[in-house]
Image (tube, rainbow, N blue to C red):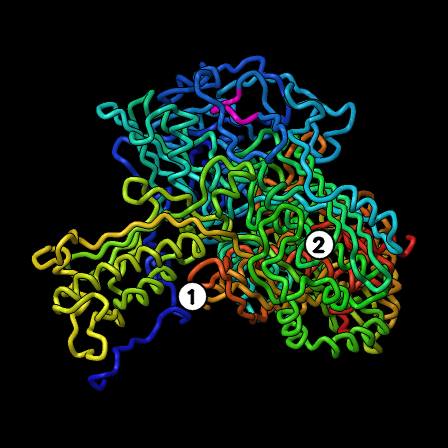
Amino acid sequence: MYPAPFDYHRPASVEEAIQILQSNPEAKIIAGGHSLLPAMKLRLAAPSALVDLHGIDELKGISVNGSATVGAMTTYDEILSNQDLANTFGALYQAVAEVGDIQVRNRGTLGGSASHADPAADATAALVAHGAEFVVRGPNGERTISADEFFVDLFTTAMEPEEVLVKINLPAPAENTSSAYAKFRHPASGYPVCGVAAVVTRDGSGTVTSARVVATGSVLKPTRLTGVEEAITGTNGDADAVAAAAERAEEGVSEWAGDHYASSEYRAHLTKVYAKRALNKALGNG
Amino acid sequence: MTATEAPTREKLVGKALKRREDPRLVQGLGRFMDDIVLPGMVHVKILRSPLAHARIRNIDTSRAASAPGVLGVFTGQDFADVNALPYAWQAAGVENHINTPRILAVDEVHWVGDPVACVVAETAQQAEDALELIELDLEELPAVVDAQATTEPGAPQLHENAPNNIAFEWDCGNAEGTDAALASAPVVVRQRIRNQRLIATPMETRGAIGQYDAGTDEYTFWLSSQAPHVHRLVMAAFVLGHPEEKIRVIAPDIGGAFGSKIFMYTEYPLVGLLSKKLGRPVKWIETREEHALATAQGRDHVTDIEVAAERDGKITGLKVTTWANLGAYLSTAAGGIPTTLYARMVAGVYKIPNIHCKVYGTYTNTALVDAYRGAGRPEAAYVAERAVDLVARELGMDPAEVRRKNFIPSDEFPFDTGIGMLPYDSGNYPAALDRALEMVGYGDFRKEQEEARARGKYLGLGFSTYVEVCGLAPTSWITSEGWGAGLWESANVRVHLTGKVVVTTGSMPHGQGHETTFSQIIADELGVPYEDIIVEWGDTAGTPFGYGSYGSRSLTVGGTAIVQSARKIRDKMKKIAAHMLEVNEDEVDFEAGKVFVKGAPDRSVSFADIALNASVGANLPPGVEPVLDATTYFDPPNCTFPFGTHIAIVEVDAETGNVELKRYVAVDDVGNVINPLIVDGQIQGGIVQGIGQALWEHGVYGEDGQLLTSTLMDYGIPKASYMPMIELDRTVTESPINPMGVKGAGEAGTIASTPAIVNAVMDALAPLGIKHIDMPLSAPRVWAAMQEAKGN
């Protein structure tokens, strides 16, 4: 339970962090450490150096003004304490509330979770559902990656090794948008065996005009359930419509996660159930 | 008080006093294994086999040996002259094909976690770094992990002396009568059930420190031990071959154990041997992952049940065949758990005329299996309680009524079930069932269930009317059952010159609250203030030989030894006090911490005055020695048999298969209760642990013998938030076998709760025709069974 020896850096700026990463290809960024440190203690990861981002003020904080910006080093607890964010981005709030325990939420960060791209993270599904944009900075300057392109595969994002996630922008939702996150917890880890985030917009008559429905845990990366999105759009969003739409959860998903606890068949089934539960919650169907 | 009234004092026995030990423990002032730091102490880390079955071709330690801080790197060859660990509890009366672990593996490894080499370094970090530099060259062999499959033709073989991987083949009961009952019964139900592998998972993992003194040729060990004297004895007689009086074992505070800290493990002699080689104290602290891989695990049975019954629900025969997975080698008590403590208890609370139980103890390429909270009795209760429910289902009868019909009648105790268990000491099974039915509102529930089913809900109620055997003892019996030592217990009571009382016990608390319970007993026996009592344990240099704490024996056996020592002290104090009062001994009484003249209680001497006189010895009657000091070695005539009724109510999510616990009612009978707060805590903790087995816990080995649940991210221990409020009550049926009328309470909850949950889930799923699902009843498993039942 002791990690292999490593060097420790605490840069004061993103630029300094990038320089350290450039000069040290075996270095890893550490944010809250709740994924990296357990892996290091089990010696599944042995980075030569840790680059701790806690000294960089630019990476911290939340601003909400219709849209929102969340610094990459913002902790889960800070997110849960921000009522404005909770009011507008309900799925993210609900997903973050499901993460770990108090100790994890006090230390774990939204940016750390996104960068780590654990296939069983809670918040990642909500970020994709809210259409988040990921602002990253590297040796070649800053760029923005869309939610649909950021998560590439299991533990893999579109970021280059020397890039640092700076902040996450959440675009202002259209009028009459509501959202929710629903989850089946793994009894040991508390991670989602399946979690679904749903963001739904309706017009004045109550017809669903757009939907983003994103699964996590049951899939290898946060994955939009395009069949469900398509099926719910144009309906009145009642429980029957939701039930019918959720039946299409398996469409377009090429590979389901599976292990000794829960088979891929079960996870595919759960994805239907939780797509339904998340949509009903978002749409306020008793 | 008038002059003729005897002094009285409020009794502490029966009062829900808060635990004396807690202020120290909750303030972080306890002293656990890793708190112990000795001058010059160094650290050992153990390299464990990454493969389940392999031949060791070569171990290259050269790079590790020259790593920073490293004092030595050792392999099995370095300890080739040290005995393999002893096997102390054989399956009785049959041949046991014995293979036990060596200090470090030689030639072959047999499970993932089998220790192959170790590094001693100045720091634990340095030792762990160097461990990665050892090059292990293994030739992989085929592995087998299943308790039953390992006996089949063509299975990989673990040990030459155990053909078909069978360590022993044992049975009890009446084979012919049972077969005849099955052949002639109008109703027969058959079911294969699995009682899955569990990992003990106490809060504190194991640890060991060894310190060898070359000047005196003495070893001192600090061990996470439930039985320090037994560890010393085994170390002396079987492993180190070193005189017992030159070995001292100290067990500090123990952060839970659940049985896993009873046994002898290779790491314990290892730290002593390393200390002797290196001239430094050597410490080993188990990591959580090592605990999962290398500490003895629990359960893991495959069992075929066959039950014969009449149409009215009367059970006429029970045939049980069990393959008990014992792991790669035999652990200390491995033979006794699936035989004496399991097979001889499969009758449960039922009077069944024909029972036969056959047990195959089998080797597999998995961690060793030994006692784990309940040890054999949870498996037995699971068999009996599932069997009765299967009969009720088959006949369409109320499971409460089938139980009642088959209960051992209350007027037939002591009752011999006819399968070699000691007679059940006392019982009143209908009383506990009635109280539980009343608490749960049974009639109303069945109506509610009907309505729920009409709405497509899967609501179910499950019973467990359990009995267990505990207070493990009579030495004459347990030795005839294959246990290689005694099971009496010791207690010494001394009264200091100032009137303070010191109790030393051979019991070994590891979370149960002995300090409080034992103090309550002494306070009443001697009439001294609770605060004046000190309870000591855990150091072989400071306590009389005792067998330690397991099998819910501390109060019934160790506590009785304390009572008897206290009564010896009382007798001597009366003798001395009568002399001081200048009357005959039969003219005085001892009450409330005073000795007084009968009928004239104002003529008295206080406890403190007697203690002072006894200790100084200035005014003693002729022939009486100074000092109040009494030791008892108590060996009871029987075990005790706690029982009760537990009822679980669950709802299964029709869409996901998830089991939601809605209510849990438990009525337990553990005889008289010394401290209700402690007993309730034991029962509740036990219930939660048993529910853990029913719903979440599962030590999963892959086909290749890799443990897939080696972290708490994978292994699902119960969490407080998963539990409903547990509704407790008790009935009291005294045990006739000890003066306090007490029975054990440490394991009853665990033994009872597992089948209650499973029976509740099967009741919930009855509309689908589902009769059995193997544990844990995780959502994926339940959903799969529901799909199958629906023909999907």
Task: Tell me the tag on residue B674.
Answer: 1
Amino acid type of the residue tagged 1 in the rendering: Ile
Task: Tell me the tag on residue B188.
Answer: none
Q: Which residues are magenta?
A: B99-105
Q: State yes or no: residue B157 in magenta.
A: no
Query: Badge 2 local density, few (<14 within 10 Å), some, or many (20+)?
Result: many
Vertical position of residue B471 compared to residue A17: above or below: below
> Chain under label 1?
B
| Residue placed most toward the observer, B175 or B335 | B175
Query: Badge 1 local density, few (<14 within 10 Å), some, or many (20+)?
Result: many
Taking B716 as reference, is B78 left or right? left
Q: Which residue is mark 2?
A: B384
Query: Which residue is depicted at the point 34% across and 56% down?
Result: B564
| Residue placed most toward the observer, B474 or B391 | B474
Q: Position of residue B401 (x, y in %)?
A: 76, 68
| Residue placed most toward the observer, B144 or B788 | B144
Query: Which residue is depicted at the point 35% across and 30% down?
Result: B282
Q: Position of residue B275 (x, y in %)?
A: 33, 26
Q: Secondary structure at mark 2?
A: helix
Q: Main secondary structure of the magenta part?
A: loop
The tag earlier along the polypeptide, 2 or 1, is 2
Do marks 2 and 1 both belong to one polypeptide chain? yes
- Name the residue furthest bottom: B2
Amino acid type of the residue tagged 2 in the rendering: Ala
Query: Which residue is depicted at the point 26% across and 27% down?
Result: B213
